[in-house]
Image (tube, coloured by chain):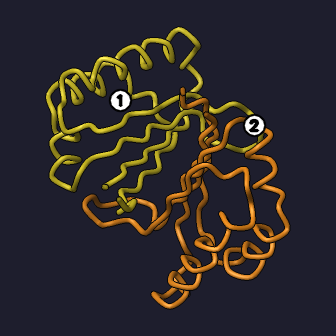
Chain colours: A yellow, B orange
Amino acid sequence: MLRHVVMFRWTDDVDDAHVAAITEALSALPASIPSIRAYRFGADVAVNDGNFNFVVTADFDDVDGYVAYRDHPEHLAMIDRLIKGHVAERAAVQFEAGA
Amino acid sequence: MLRHVVMFRWTDDVDDAHVAAITEALSALPASIPSIRAYRFGADVAVNDGNFNFVVTADFDDVDGYVAYRDHPEHLAMIDRLIKGHVAERAAVQFEAGA
């Protein structure tokens, strides 16, 4: 299994309504991108100080499945509409997560 | 389910042997920390430029399960021994990841 993880620290203009729109847009992606095996995302619960604001974890069979997601037009469209211009910091890793 | 995600960008002194030691130390933690429900970690596979170097994803029933892990003596000991002083950048989120 190939797991993709990406975290964001938002710019100050990102309010709860914006995060709700991101959540709604992400929720729609698995129906359109069949290589997604599991898709979990959400806002930081504020247990610790200094955390990033939001994370997406997505599981695929392999790198090809991830790349199909990364480059999928619906994914790119939601990034253009809701993410681009609102990111203060971004951190990402793709890793081999076992069976 | 509460999912904890933490990413690291290592300092330049962290070589493959050091990463192998981190991987070995992490592999031992689930046997000692019963609140861990799933534990996956690994180095970035270098599909994309600019990524962080390493990620840990850990699943718990709830925030209490995560805090038991965060504050567990074996976890803190491996951080002291292998992580502290070797982190150029760190990014973390804990989020409610559904059922």
Mark 1 Cα within 10 Å, few/some/many (few <14, many 20+)?
few
Q: Residue at x 59, y 41 (%)?
A: B3
Query: Are the residues under marks 1 and 2 on the same chain?
Result: no
Residue underneath mark 2: B63
Residue B41 vs A89, above or below: the answer is: below
Q: Residue at x 21, y 56 (%)?
A: A63
Q: Could you say whether the residue bearing mark 1 is in a helix, strand or loop?
A: loop
* Chain ID at mark 1: A
Residue underneath mark 1: A84
The residue most toward the bottom is: B17
* Chain ID at mark 2: B
Residue B67 vs B86, above or below: the answer is: above
Q: Residue at x 73, y 33 (%)?
A: A46
Q: Is residue B81 left or right of residue A76?
A: right
Q: What kind of residue is marked 2? A: Val
Q: Position of residue A29 (x, y in %)?
A: 27, 24
Q: Position of residue A70 (x, y in %)?
A: 22, 41
Q: Could you say whether the residue bearing mark 2 is in a helix, strand or loop?
A: helix
Q: Is residue A62 left or right of residue A97?
A: left
Quadrant in the picture for the N terminus of chain B: top right
Q: What kind of residue is marked 1? A: Lys
Q: Nearer the viewer, mark 1 or mark 2?
A: 2
Q: Nearer the viewer, residue A54 or B33?
A: B33
